Image: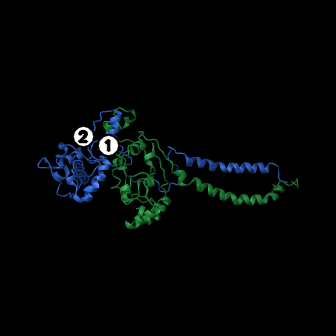
């Protein structure tokens, strides 16, 4: 600006006076980005709250909550197999062959039962392909449904309530105490011991020799 | 001199920097029917089919294949009539099969399974007053027939094999539970139903003398 003949660009002089501001910006900028990515990229943002639209408006709040039907009535493979299977249409028809037989909401259930084609339920809780989660190993040893699935008995439409990320799994494998309960209450919703859950859990884990492992091959096999 | 626009511009930049946080906070607080974003696809999707996944190769879309008609899987022959059908010489068995031991643990298992699969209709005591039955009655909807009580002479005299068969294959409007309840568990439920029947048809003489005071 001082030398009008020069064509080269020169920073304006006033920039010198804001050098402390620029230094602050250079410091705060990366911190800002790290915090933003940490917050936005957390499984709490990307995973929790997934609530797909299901082909049949089945309400867990009614069946499991209000009627109090045990989770295992429909998910009857949970204590035996790795997978708590989605029930075949036959199980819906146990009751709905005689109740709400004309309901339009159940049209797809009746269709499926008549044709033998499965109802295309949308999977909510989906782990990455190369991690194995065995339901029976957890449920029969004292981890309740609620610990990973939340209060399903209050959900009209099921959504993912927990992060189901590796760090989240490891949190519990390292300190399972607060998530333990006697296996007979595994499907109970809102169960809590009469004492401090950590105290109860520590005793329960010791009595039952529960030592969850953290090796890679515990889950990746 | 610092230009006049510098500080307002800085203030606007700081405000704009907060917008992404507000958007993420909104995302965290709301539910979405859309598939979740996969920012890094590190082996999230495999090529092997998992339980109950779809496979477009088959007309019914199932990756898990049902058994082929007319075949028997290894270990599934189920030739023992008493164990698997509750029959001895074509008649319903009055006893439990030799391989099934009735003991306290088995009764506890029977109670536990009863309360999962039978309780909704038959109720805690087998009177037929389960919550689904009550609700179906109240709705007056469909063709619901309430379950009959276990506590009649007819049902008390019913052979164990008959009750086992009813659980396995259903009876009248009661559906079959052979799919949902394993064979040993069905026998355990039979034993528990027997216990319920005795409990609801007992006299004070059935109670050990030293415990009678507790009932008064």
Q: Residue at x 34, y 47 (%)?
A: A73
In this view, the residue in front, A208 or B73, is A208
- Is B32 in front, or is A1? B32
Q: Is residue A176 above or below residue B195?
A: below
Q: Which chain is blue?
A: B
Secondary-structure class at tag 1: loop
The residue labelled by disc 1 is B130
Q: Is residue B135 left or right of residue A129?
A: left
Residues packed near mark 1 inside 10 Å, few (<14), some (14 to 19) or many (20 plus): many
Q: Nearer the viewer, residue A27 or A154?
A: A154
Q: Which residue is mark 2?
A: B148
Q: Is residue A9 left or right of residue A199?
A: right
What chain does mark 1 sit on?
B
- Where residue A85 is drawn, which disc sits there? none
Colour green belongs to chain: A
Q: Secondary structure at mark 2?
A: loop
Viewer-proximal residue among A41 and B87: B87
Q: CA distance from mark 1 to mark 2?
A: 11 Å
Asked if residue A99 can be seen in this view, the reply is no
Position of residue A84 measured from the top left corner of the image (x, y, whole percent): 37, 52
Residue B95: where, in percent of width, then height? 16, 53
Q: Chain of mark 2?
A: B
Do circles 1 and 2 both sit on a common chain?
yes
Residue B84 drawn at (x, y percent):
20, 51
Q: Position of residue A88 (x, y in %)?
A: 33, 44
* Mark closest to the chain's N terminus, 1 or 2: 1
**Residue at image point 32% right, 43% down:** B130
Q: Quadrant of the N terminus of chain B?
A: bottom right
């Amino acid at each position: 600006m001082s030398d009008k003949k020069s064509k080269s660009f020169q920073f304006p002089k006033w920039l010198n006076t804001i050098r402390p501001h620029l230094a602050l910006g250079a410091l705060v900028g990366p911190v800002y980005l790290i915090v933003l990515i940490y917050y936005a990229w957390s499984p709490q943002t990307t995973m929790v709250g997934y609530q797909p639209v299901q082909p049949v408006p089945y309400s867990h709040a009614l069946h499991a909550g209000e009627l109090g039907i045990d989770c295992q009535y429909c998910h009857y493979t949970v204590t035996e197999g790795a997978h708590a299977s989605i029930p075949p249409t036959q199980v819906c028809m146990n009751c709905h062959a005689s109740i709400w037989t004309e309901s339009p909401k159940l049209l797809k259930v009746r269709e499926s039962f008549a044709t033998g084609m499965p109802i295309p339920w949308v999977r909510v809780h989906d782990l990455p392909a190369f991690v194995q989660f065995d339901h029976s190993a957890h449920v029969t040893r004292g981890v309740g449904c609620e610990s990973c699935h939340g209060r399903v008995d209050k959900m009209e439409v099921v959504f993912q309530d927990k992060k189901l990320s590796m760090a989240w799994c490891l949190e519990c494998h390292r300190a399972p105490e607060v998530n333990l309960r006697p296996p007979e209450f595994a499907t109970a919703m809102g169960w809590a011991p009469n004492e401090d859950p950590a105290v109860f859990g520590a005793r329960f884990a010791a009595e039952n020799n529960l030592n969850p492992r953290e090796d890679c091959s515990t889950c990746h096999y | 001199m610092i230009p006049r626009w510098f500080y307002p511009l800085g203030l606007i930049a700081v405000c704009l920097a907060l917008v992404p946080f507000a958007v993420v906070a909104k995302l965290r607080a709301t539910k979405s029917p859309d598939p979740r974003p996969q920012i890094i696809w590190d082996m999230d999707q495999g090529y092997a089919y998992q339980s109950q996944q779809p496979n477009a190769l088959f007309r019914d879309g199932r990756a898990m294949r049902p058994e082929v008609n007319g075949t028997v899987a290894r270990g599934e022959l189920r030739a023992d009539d008493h164990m698997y059908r509750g029959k001895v010489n074509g008649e319903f068995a009055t006893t439990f099969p030799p391989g099934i031991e009735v003991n306290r643990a088995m009764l506890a298992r029977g109670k536990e399974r009863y309360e999962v699969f039978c309780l909704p209709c038959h109720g805690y005591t087998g009177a037929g007053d389960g919550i689904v039955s009550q609700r179906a009655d109240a709705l007056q909807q469909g063709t619901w027939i309430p379950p009959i009580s276990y506590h009649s002479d007819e049902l008390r005299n019913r052979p164990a094999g008959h009750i086992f068969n009813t659980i396995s294959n259903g009876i009248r409007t009661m559906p079959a539970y052979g799919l949902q309840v394993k064979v040993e568990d069905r026998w355990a439920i039979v034993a528990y139903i027997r216990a319920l029947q005795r409990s609801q048809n007992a006299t004070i003489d059935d109670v050990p003398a030293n415990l009678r005071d507790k009932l008064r």
